Amino acid sequence: MTNLILGIETSCDETAAAVISGGHTILSNVVWSQVAIHHPYGGVVPELASRKHMEKIVPVVEEALAVAGADSNGIDGVAVTCGPGLVGALLVGLSFAKAFAYARGLPLTGVNHLHGHIAAVYLQPDPPPFPFVALLASGGHTNIYYVAGPMDFEHMGQTRDDAAGEAFDKVAKILGLGYPGGAVIDQLSQQGDPERIRFPRAFLDKAGFDFSFSGIKTAVVRYVQSEKEGTGNIPDIAAGFQEAVVDVLVQKGISAAKARSCQHLALVGGVASNRRLRERIREAAQEAGIAVHIPIPELCTDNAAMIAAIGYHQLSRGEESFIDLDVYSKTMHSGRLGVVKL
Ligand code: KG4
Ligand code: ZN
């Protein structure tokens, strides 16, 4: 019986816990954001992130259980993010999850954070039927998958350099808008003209599904250095940059769905909370006769409900982890400018 799943997520700078029922109903979804802690450093400081997770993990889980009205003995299984992410941060969530599961004799399953982002659409009132294509755009990754079943992810393409969210964060830094940059650029762009400054779109080879976002960032740096215009121009730069990233994501996402004859496209990850991207991909999908599925913004950015959602399927299929379960950093955040090395 794997009805009530406790999900735990500590891969970066959010301490998160959630309880979901039956693989699709969210009973609680608690996220404690560390943004204010890392903001003065202009990026996530791994050591500080781990320490804050240590402090917050117990109260966050307690709150998730209380909001769900679940006794800790009423939980049927535990799902925890094992990677990719910051190793020290992941270890806090994993150690807690192991102790929680071991003490109660519960099944434990280790979850890939990226699969979790995709599983956010399983929590939607109207989830996409299989197969569908998923475009994942976050701070550490920009990937396209063909999703044949709840746990069947075929990788179709990825960024060759910066992730889309990373480009947002770096451009925000260049424009002096602080960290993290995505939401600020989203906001500021509403006052800007997206057509006035045209930044390059790197579509790479038309047939493939790889991305490149480092060129757009460099173009913004060059523009800022050459123009030396006043701050009044910043909304136009933000809107022009955002439009370029959105153009590429929309075109690649739609053409990936077409290439695999999929009538359903999911847009997930932190960047999927971007208003312009949500609007433009909906328009383009409608034109192409494709149904687009985008989680509510709270389920696009890091959370534990999505971890519990994929964990539910893993546990239902008997994919239990052992007590020697370990974490992995993989590509996530390595070499990412958003992470500060002290
Ligand atoms: O998925 P996420 O919460 O964490 C990772 O797994 O990386 O994504 C965080 C990324 C950050 O780069 C952040 O700037 C970006 O998502 N982001 C946005 C918006 N909200 C968050 N990017 C564009 N527009 C937004 N509204
Ligand atoms: Zn994430």
Image (cartoon, grey):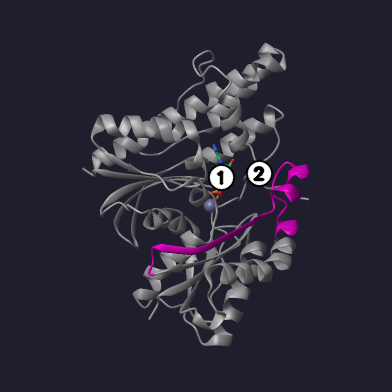
- Residue at the limit of the structure toward the left, as seen here: 261
Magenta region includes residue 72: no
Q: Is residue 88 visible?
A: yes
- Identify the residue at image location x=52%, y=45%: 270
> Residue 93 — which label?
none
Distance between mark 1 and mark 2 Cα atoms: 8 Å
Magenta region includes residue 23: yes
Amino acid identity at mark 2: Gly
The residue carrying mark 2 is 338
Q: Position of residue 201 (x, y in %)?
A: 45, 25
User: Circle 1: is it few (<14), some (14-19), or many (20+) Cα within 10 Å?
Assistant: many
- Identify the residue at image location x=72%, y=14%: 230
- Identify the residue at image location x=49%, y=70%: 110
- Does ligand 1 reach within 8 Å of label 2's beta carbon? yes
Q: Position of residue 97 (x, y in %)?
A: 58, 75
- Does ligand 1 reach within 8 Å of label 1's beta carbon? yes
Amino acid identity at mark 1: Gly
Dot 1 lies on which element?
loop
Q: Is residue 208 left or right of residue 103?
A: left
- Identify the residue at image location x=41%, y=32%: 279
Q: Quadrant of residue 251?
A: top left
Q: Are marks 1 and 2 in contact (CB under 8 Å)?
A: yes
205 shown above or below 130: above
Instruction: Identify which residue, 200 or 311, lies in the foreground.
Output: 311
Query: Which quarter holds ligand 1?
Result: top right
The residue carrying mark 1 is 139
